[in-house]
Each structure stands twice: as structure tokens, then as C-alpha cells.
Image: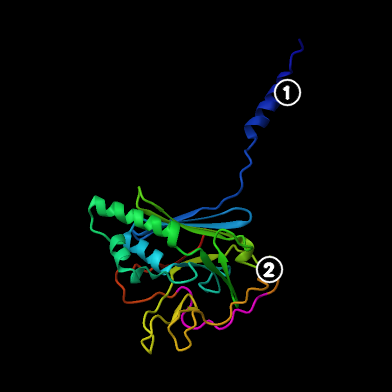
Amino acid sequence: MKKIPLVLVLFLFIQSSMAKPSVSPVAIDTVITGENVTYNFTQDANHFFLNIQTSDDNTIMSMLHLGVSVFFDIKGKKKENVYIKYPSEPVGLSDRRGDRERIEPENSEEDEEGKGQLIKEILENDYPQKAEYGYFDYQEEFHILLNSLGVTVSLTYDEKDGLLEYALKIPKNKTNLDSAKSTSKLTVGVKTNTIERKSKDGGGLSGTIGGIGLGGGQNGQGRSGGRQGGGGPSGGRGQGGQRGGPPPGAVEKGNPAEVVLNFWFKPNL
């Protein structure tokens, strides 16, 4: 039997010890905001991922009722021109008094169990499946599970831990259509949406949530004009129409039961 030279053995050993597993680069930035929300921001080669979690009852109610807008500003400022808003329409939990009282129960174990079951039931059966993508003058409503944007967004509830989780996956090229521009200065904003309950003529809901008009005005239309479905950011901007009222991140005031989410952060990219 031929003997393997000692030099060759040492060379093979050094090479194997220096070999590194192939791992996709992922940047992580995890922060605790007060005592109500934790969030986790990551990326891979083509996508950004945002995960928000809370076990605070009032924050859960706020996120469910008002919805959440996430903003992306590649210039490192706090501009609200690029966003994902979910849901795209207001959720009338505040008008479903019985449901709301069950979501905000006393502290007994039985009440907590009933609250968890109701939240899960609402999310699985009754919660909207439409979100909105905005890129400057272009807006597009899309289904959260199946769409041509490549965006996925979800709200799930863990009954055991009493934890509401918001998860967003968005292609990087939907936050920045100009590939020549770097996202190294990216800042991300998280805000609960806005809803106004009173119209001037007393005729039900009016105003906007994230720039979308609500019914109850003189013309009774459910939305303010013109989100154009054709085209899109990848093939030229669509015409978004007039977007009256406050921006998508503005929050209704005067309701102490709902916690306002309103913060920006710079990911560790």
C-alpha cells in the first residue's frame, strides 16, 4: 500500500478546516419598542422581511381595527411615498360592540381563552384579504396571498401565547424602482392607519383611512377617485388619482383604548 505523503495530508486538513458553509447574507435588526411591540427586520438577496409581534391587548386591538402601514424611504428620511398598507379598507370592529367587548375581556382565564378564540376566528374567517401598495403617484390594491407584485403580508394570532404577529415580505425592487440607487440608507416606518367616524352631514362614516375615502359623504362613494389597475411601477407608473385627507400613516385621535404605532428605524443592512 502506498503511503500518502505527510505534506499532502496536512494540506487537505488545512483546506477542510478553512472551508465555510454557503449561507445567504442576512442582516438582522431586532428592537423592543416600549413594552408593547417587538419587531424584526431581515433581508435576503431579493427581499426585505418585517415581523412585528405584540401580546398587549390594546395594541392588538389597534392593529386589528385600524390596520398597519409600513413605509420605505431609501434616502434615509421619513417620507411616506412608498408603502404597504394592510388591510386596504377599515375594519369595523369598533362598531361590533359585542365582539369588541369579548376581545377586551376581564382577566379571568376563561375570558382570555374566549378572546383568543374570537381573534383567531376573525383573522381566519372575516378579516380582509386585500392590501394596498403605494409608490409615489401609483397605488394598487392586491390580494395578500396571490398577486403579481410578489408581496405577501399576514396577521396571525397564537392563542397559547396571546401573541399577534404581523409579517411582511416585499421584493427590494418594489421599494426602489431605480436599480442604480442604493438602499444602504433605507429607513422603515410603521404606523397604524387613520379612520374618521363623523361626517359633516351626520351620514355615517367619512374621511379616509390611509388615503382611501369612506362612504357617507354626499355622493355616497366608498372610495376617493381613481386607483388605476392597468400598468404598474415595473412598466411605468399608473395614475393614482386624488388622495384626499391625511397620509396612510396618520392615526385617529381621541380613542384611548387603541395604542398608536408610530415609529421609524434604520435597519442594519
Residue 234 bears which disc, if any? Answer: 2
Depth order, front residue of 170/80: 170
What residue did someone put label 1 on?
A: 8
Depth order, front residue of 146/171: 146
> In the rendered image, is residue 223 in sight?
yes
Q: Residues within 10 Å of mark 2 (few under 14, many from 20)?
A: few
Image x and y of residue 113, in percent: 30, 51
Q: Indicate left or right for 28 with 10 as reference.
A: left
- Residue at x-position 31% and y-position 56%: 115
Q: Main secondary structure of the magenta part?
A: loop
Q: Relative to 230, say whether 110 is above or below.
A: above
What element does badge 2 sit on? loop
Q: Relative to 164, say whether 260 is above or below.
A: below
CB under 8 Å between discs 2 and 1? no
What element does badge 1 sit on? helix
> In the rendered image, is residue 269 in sight?
no
Q: Residue furthest top?
A: 1
Depth order, front residue of 239/120: 120
Q: Residues within 10 Å of mark 1 (few under 14, many from 20)?
A: few
Image x and y of residue 52, in percent: 44, 58
Image x and y of residue 212, in percent: 50, 77
Residue 88 bears which disc, if any? Answer: none
Mark 2 or 1, which is nearer the eye? 2
Residue 93, by quadrant, is: bottom left
- Residue at x-position 62% and y-position 77%: 228
Q: Amino acid at mark 1?
A: Leu
- Residue at x-position 30% and y-position 54%: 114
Image x and y of residue 238, in percent: 65, 76
In the image, the segment drawn in magenta is 237-249
